[in-house]
Image (cartoon, rainbow, N blue to C red):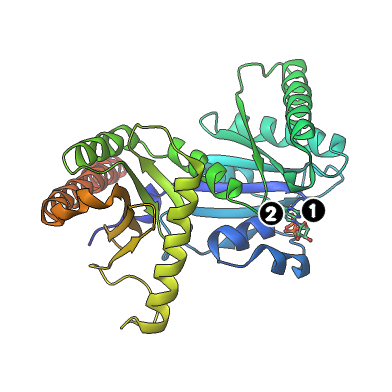
Amino acid sequence: TTAASPEEQPRILLMGLRRSGKSSIQKVVFHKVSPNETLFLESTNKIVKDDVSNSSFVQFQVWDVPGQIDFFDPTFDSETIFGGCGALIFVIDAQDDYIEALARLQMEVTRAYKINPNIKFEVFIHKVDGLSDDNKIETQRDIHQRSTDDLAEAGMENVHLSFHLTSIYDHSIFEAFSKVVQKLIPQLPVLENLLNILISNSGIEKAFLFDVMSKIYIATDSSPVDMQCYELCCDMIDVVIDMSCIYGARDDGAFDGDSSAIIKLNTNTILYLREVNRHLALICILREDSFDKQGLIDYNFGCFRKAIQQVFDIKKQAAAARAKTNATRAF
Ligand code: GDP
């Protein structure tokens, strides 16, 4: 099976003040730690390269920004760090006073933008589980206003920030990460199109392409996403991984290339999971009677999987060709 090579995988940098929740996010999304266990995490105080590259489609690093401003921190090689990164997520603790965080946000965005204007800037307004619904909206409005004003003042009005309300205590953190990752996948329109073709020819209602390790969905068909469906799929991945860990033939408990699982719900609905490659799995939601044609679905899935492999292969070949040209030029 093929998987994108590290250079092509989406790279994400997670930044924010101490205690804003960065390590918790990292643990919950990429290491299956339960939210309550993060209460006892040691706070990060340096750059942490999280090596999830073998197990996950997404690559990312965590960087703690200290409270006081230090432009000459020698451990922070901004060229390398911002140069190779696709998205910068800045985490703000919404349960705390965020004035200082906003100052840092503005500083980091300015610094990063100067080095790499292609970075996508994403602001996670985090720990919103402690806020009422009205308060959430008000906080988002306030942070949005202040941060865009700050940027305009600094003459950076063309820099775009996206905002997400997040918490590790529900699926919002996975949803937000999914949106961030999707922006970094150049093949997204092709993937969406393939999913549309697959579902319309197989009597499927909704399909998600998941990064299994992180439960981030990297693409879905163009029908609207219902949070409950997404949550069901996330739960299914947890169940399947737990089962594979206990009964799977391989030591690392991962999928073996042909894993599949079927869950029947008492609402006449079926969840059908099929592995696509080492990192990715397809989860379909369909009515029970449509599943009578499982042979057809499986056949269509085979075509879908082949197409996905080609999509990522083409990109790899292009990267190899580029590398070759560059090498010739250097020579
Ligand atoms: P870091 O220094 O940015 O890495 O922050 P930590 O990940 O160590 O988190 C600091 C504290 O915030 C920990 O006690 C976490 O349990 C807590 N925390 C993290 N995320 C959330 C969240 O979504 N909601 C709430 N209520 N607490 C959170």
Q: Which label belongs to residue 22? A: 2
Mark 2 vs ligand 1: CB below 8 Å: yes
Residue at the image point whose x is 34% and y is 61% from the top? 264
Q: Where does residue 189 sit, x and y in percent of width and height?
A: 31, 32
Mark 1 vs ligand 1: CB below 8 Å: yes
Q: Which residue is mark 1?
A: 18
Side (left or right) of 295 relative to 226: left
> Does residue 177 appear in this view?
yes
Up the image or down, 304 lies above or below 114; here it is below
Task: Give the amino acid type for the residue marked by disc 2 in the picture.
Answer: Lys
Task: Give the amino acid type for the residue marked by disc 1 in the picture.
Answer: Arg
Q: Nearer the viewer, residue 228 or 277?
A: 228
Side (left or right) of 33 relative to 43: left
The Cα atoms of the two marked residues, 1 and 2, are separated by 8 Å
- Locate the C terminus and report the quarter of the image it occupies: top left
Q: Which label belongs to residue 140? A: none
Badge 1 crowding class, 10 Å Cα cut-off, few under 14, some 14 to 19, many 20 or more, is many
Residue at the image point whose x is 76% and y is 18% from the top? 149
Element under disc 1: loop
Residue at the image point whose x is 32% and y is 55% from the top? 270
